[in-house]
Amino acid sequence: MVGVRRFDEEEVLGRAEAVFRSHGYESTSMLDLSRATGVQRGSLYNAYGDKEELFLRTFARYEARFLATAAEALSAPDVRAGLAAFFDAAIANMTAGPARGCLSTRLASEGDAPGPRVCGEVRALLLRLEQLLQDAFARAAPPPVLPPAAAARMVITFTRGLAVMERVHGDPAALAATAADVVDLLLPPPPSA
């Protein structure tokens, strides 16, 4: 039947995500995506139109999953514990599977090459994440050493650096230790009694 997708879209988007995480947007071709998904290029074009649209669908799925995980971690009553859980989740995301790293950081490092729609989606994800962090810092007691907005921006910047260091060293334990240090810097532990 013409126009009917004969593939599992969730599986295709998951495999496409792995390719984009591994190769980035610019270096990924429709042939790469076809090989990884097991779906012929013509069928991918019929379903998504072009690489950009396939990427945007893939990224929307990634964003929803990532932001839900971040929101869950950051909603913890103890903001220190929530920030630590957020870093744990971010590190797990970066180190999962053979396609390591962070998809949004990978794309951001490509500059404007992916085009305005893709770059806009990456910016939007980072702004949403920044707002989640700012909201968490705003309810921290005692408050962070920086104003909530500045602390949120610092965490966004730090996690981009974490993603780069993960690709360089591939050492989750070192990433976790550094993340714990950042938690202590932003939300110092209470003095021992």
Image: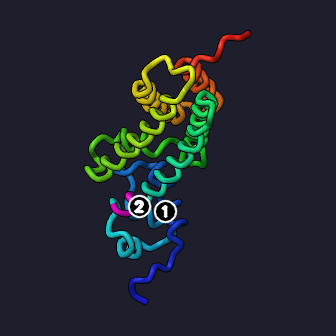
- Decide if residue 69 is on the left or right side of residue 16: right
Give the amino acid type for the residue marked by disc 2 in the picture: Arg
142 vs 18: above or below: above
Quarter holding the C terminus is: top right
Residue 55 is inside the magenta segment: yes
Q: Quadrant of residue 41?
A: bottom left
140 vs 89: above or below: above
Identify the disc placed on residue 46: none
Residue 137, percent from left and from top: 50, 29
Q: Which residue is mark 1?
A: 13
Give the amino acid type for the residue marked by disc 1 in the picture: Leu
Residue 131, percent from left and from top: 42, 38
Q: Which of these two is toward me, 43 or 127?
A: 127
Neighbor class of circle 1 (other Cα within 10 Å; few <14, some 14-19, many 20+) is many
Residue 91 visible (yes or no): no
- Decide if residue 93 is on the left or right side of residue 19: right
Q: Which residue is mark 2?
A: 57
Q: Which residues are magenta?
A: 53-57
Residue 20 visible (yes or no): yes
Q: Nearer the viewer, mark 1 or mark 2?
A: 2
Neighbor class of circle 2 (other Cα within 10 Å; few <14, some 14-19, many 20+) is some
Quarter holding the N terminus is: bottom left
Magenta span: predominant SS is helix
User: Contact (CB < 8 A) between labels 1 and 2?
Assistant: yes
User: Mark 1 falls on what kind of element?
Assistant: helix
